[in-house]
Image: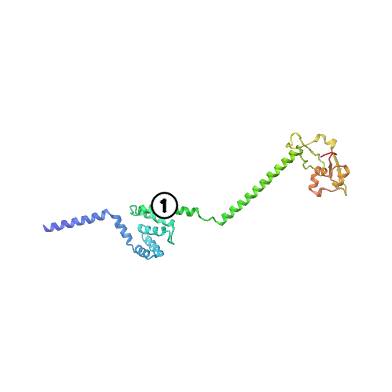
Amino acid sequence: MKFWSVLGRVLTLAALVVGAIGCNPTSGSQSRLEDDPDFVRGKSRLARKNIDGAVLSFREALANNPGNAAAHFELGLIFYEPSNEKNNYVSACYHFQRHLELQRDSRHAGNIEGFIRACKKEIAKDIAMAPIPPSEINAIHSLRTQLAKVSGENSQLKSQVQAMRGRLQQAGGDVPPPSVAAGGPPPSVNPSNPRTPPRPNYGSRSSQTRTHTLKPGESLYSISRQYGVPFAVLKAANSRLMRNSRDLKPGVTVYIPPKGTP
């Protein structure tokens, strides 16, 4: 009887031990991860404020076992600490997320989720405040300079157009004669519509056209006195010759506008 009684107690104790182990396998696994020599060495170095040595030891623990959730958690805390010279929110966020992936029932889950949100905010700040490369700054300055130049030219063109409109209104639509080829008739202007493009008066050319062949020693000024035509009017009628002085040579035909031409 005593034998069976002792055997029963042994079996009951064994069942309790097996049940305890089977009900909490995670904690046992976690304790084994924390017993890793490199992990223990990292905790010891961390307690002595040897941050570089602690980081090295925890990384060696991960090299031995990439699934060491405890090592990820310790590295996340080191990189998350703002006052730590190893502060790196990107690395902290990575190690915290790996810890939760490896140990979903972590007792630190609530705090870690808050740490991850804080890390992401700090990362966003760093991106927003990142310095602009010098090459991009120079490109921006160049574009601003070009824009200012174009704006200035645009304003100048607008001013010139306004001035031309004012002169046309004051002159009652009288448009100065445009450039014509030597020997050609002056263009006519429609007085009822000063903006209408001028058209040559070919019908009256035969009765009003006069020409003069330039002789050696002659000039437009001497010809204007010879025919009694104002020098400015003669220049306007032969503007091509005025633009290119090499065309003022003997044998060139000069158009003589009628007297009284404005």
Measured as percent of width and height from the top left, residue 59 is found at 39, 61
Q: Quadrant of the N terminus?
A: bottom left
Percent coordinates x, y for residue 156 in the rendering: 68, 46
- Where in the figure is residue 140, as x and y percent of width and height? 58, 52
- Residue 33: image quadrant is bottom left
Label 1 packing within 10 angstroms: few (<14), some (14-19), many (20+): few
Q: Residue furthest front?
A: 170
Would residue 66 appear left or right of 250 to someone viewing this image? left
**Circle 1: residue type:** Arg
- Quadrant of residue 84 within the rendered picture: bottom left
Quadrant of the snapshot with the C terminus: top right
**140 or 99: nearer the eye?**
140
- Residue at horizontal 30%, vertical 56%? 27
Whole-percent x and y of residue 161? 70, 42
Q: Identify the residue at image location x=37%, y=57%.
A: 73
- Identified at 33% across, 60% down, the residue is 34
Q: Is residue 37 above or below residue 150?
A: below
For numbered disc 1, what is the local secondary structure?
helix
Query: Left or right of 105: which side holds 228?
Result: right
In this figure, which residue is indicated by the disc labeled 1? 117
